[in-house]
Amino acid sequence: METRTPASTAVAATLPMVVVPQTLPASATSLMLRNTNALLLLTLLFSAGVAAVSAASRRPAPGIVPILAGTFGLLFVVYRLKNSVWALPAVFGLTGFMGYMLGPLLSEVMTLLGGGQVIAFSNSRAEQTSRLRAAISANQLPPQRFSAIQFGVPER
């Protein structure tokens, strides 16, 4: 006698299994977000440090081929190592390479007349915009006021 499995069982056996994430307690979620933000801060500081060293040492700008090969190569490495302990050094390598690419541009802008003021103004403007967006998302500021401030429209 021959036993046959129903067609639905055979199809279900070939489909990938769906994993439903368990909900974490609030303290564990808070700790995870804090650790994630700490890692993001460290990669940002590393990238800024490499950009500062690259700008201060007046390194030449890399060509288009090294930029594309380095960026896409490091992105591929990060993707392939995403579930490995080696993903963290790969991410730091990618952010450091981005800082190296940014360094020559910063040093060139700093040599222009008023270049330092341009960089400082763009940083302060980005900070002001991000603070206003945070205030809107927290419902502390009406959107009409945000658009007026963002685009330099005087209020009435």
Image (cartoon, grey):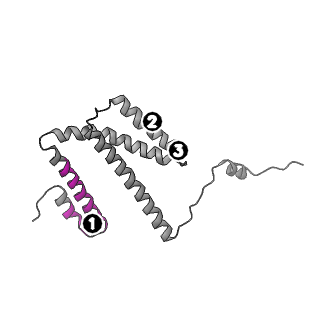
Q: Which mark is residue 135?
A: 1
Q: Which mark is residue 80?
A: none
Label 3–label 1 contact, CB within 8 A: no
Q: Is residue 39 left or right of residue 106?
A: right
Percent position of residue 118, x then y:
17, 47
Percent position of residue 25, x then y:
52, 70
Which residue appears at 41% of the width and 35% of the height?
70
Residue 115 forms part of the magenta stretch:
no
- What is the CA distance from the residue labelled 2 to the residue labelled 3? 12 Å
- What is the CA distance from the residue labelled 1 to the residue labelled 2? 38 Å
Q: Which mark's residue is nearer the viewer, 1 or 2? A: 2
Magenta span covers which residues? 119-146
Percent position of residue 106, x then y:
24, 41
Q: Dot 3 corresponds to which residue?
A: 81
Instruction: Identify the mark nearer the N-term, 1 or 2.
Output: 2
Instruction: Identify the secondary structure beneath mark 3.
Output: loop
Q: Which mark is residue 73?
A: 2
Which residue appears at 31% of the width and 68% of the height?
138
